[in-house]
Amino acid sequence: MTQPFITRLTALWLLAGLWWAGSVAVHLFYIKRVGQQVIEPLPPILIKHGTDWQTRLPGALFSRAGSDMARAAHTPIDRLSLHLLANPGLAVAITGQYTLDEASATVAPDLGKARAANLADRLMADGIGPGQIQVGSERVPSLRYVNDSTGALTVAFTKARPTTARSLADAQRYIDLFHPMELYFESGQTTFIRTPETDRFVADAVPFLKQARGPALRVTGHTDSVGTLAANQRLSLRRAVAVRQFLVKLGARPGRILPQGRGPSQPIAANATPEGRLANRRVTVVIKR
């Protein structure tokens, strides 16, 4: 009688121990789940054309007050570029968003435009013409952040605009003197097209270049491939010199500006199309640190 009784008692103790351990585990798991806030990820940014084509940018696209896109955006941007190349009559309207708090935490003069420009620059690097890209900025009351990242971008399709020297000039965005900016010219002219963005460049460049010392502004002229190499070389240098003269008349020191002509050797678009040739007739201004 003693042996079965001990065996039953041991089994009861074992069952009680298992019940207690299980209760503690369930209780601890419940406490942890209740105390832990479940954070929903940022939804992806849908880019949709009709019912047959779409792609998605990652929801965590920018850091707080930042304008550089996440690397995860590269693949959907490649898809967008291919779609625009296949549909030359199509354009994208890119609107960068920002909040007042973000604007006060960055040196970018327009954070929304800088965010939109980041995508626009990537598309142009893939061969998309400025006529297929429209850039805008919008200040919004609030943005949702997850791990200090946000979406802050909308992309919609619209009709492409005809590409002209003026539309190319209007599409340029000035960030600062250390980021390249393209100046455009009407056919046969050596005076660059003035826009609000080029005026901002001039307003920053002249006081900086008035100083006796400092890095030089590189002014590099470019042309398309039409005509002889020698003629294009002369034209590209003439336009670069004209930009230097313009700045010098406003007070910049000549020695702080280095003009050079590259002719057709550094195209940014295909010379096989009229739009590409227009894009290549330009002067690049930038200060190299």
Image: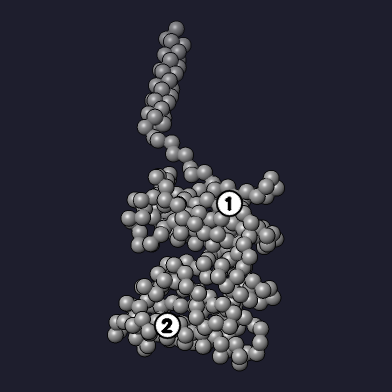
Residue 55 in percent (x, y) is at 62, 51
Q: Mark 2 points at which residue?
A: 246
Q: Name the residue under label 1.
A: 156
Instruction: Please tell me whether residue 154 is drawn above or below residue 262 in the rendered image.
Output: above
The residues tagged by marks 1 and 2 sit, at their Cα atoms, a distance apart of 39 Å
- Mark 1: which amino acid? Ala
Instruction: Please tell me whether residue 156 is drawn above or below residue 288 in the rendered image.
Output: above
Total numbered labels placed on residues in the image: 2
Along the line of sight, the residue nearer the viewer: 130 or 169: 169
Identity of the residue drawn at 43% across and 20% down? 19
Residue 136 in percent (x, y) is at 49, 57
Tell me the mark number nearer the camera, choosing from 1 and 2. Answer: 2
Q: In this view, does 88 lie to the left or right of 33?
A: right
Crowd band around label 1 with a 10 angstrom C-alpha radius: few (<14), some (14–19), many (20+): some
Q: Is residue 271 left or right of residue 215?
A: right
Identity of the residue drawn at 56% across and 67% down? 167
Identity of the residue drawn at 53% across and 75% down? 184
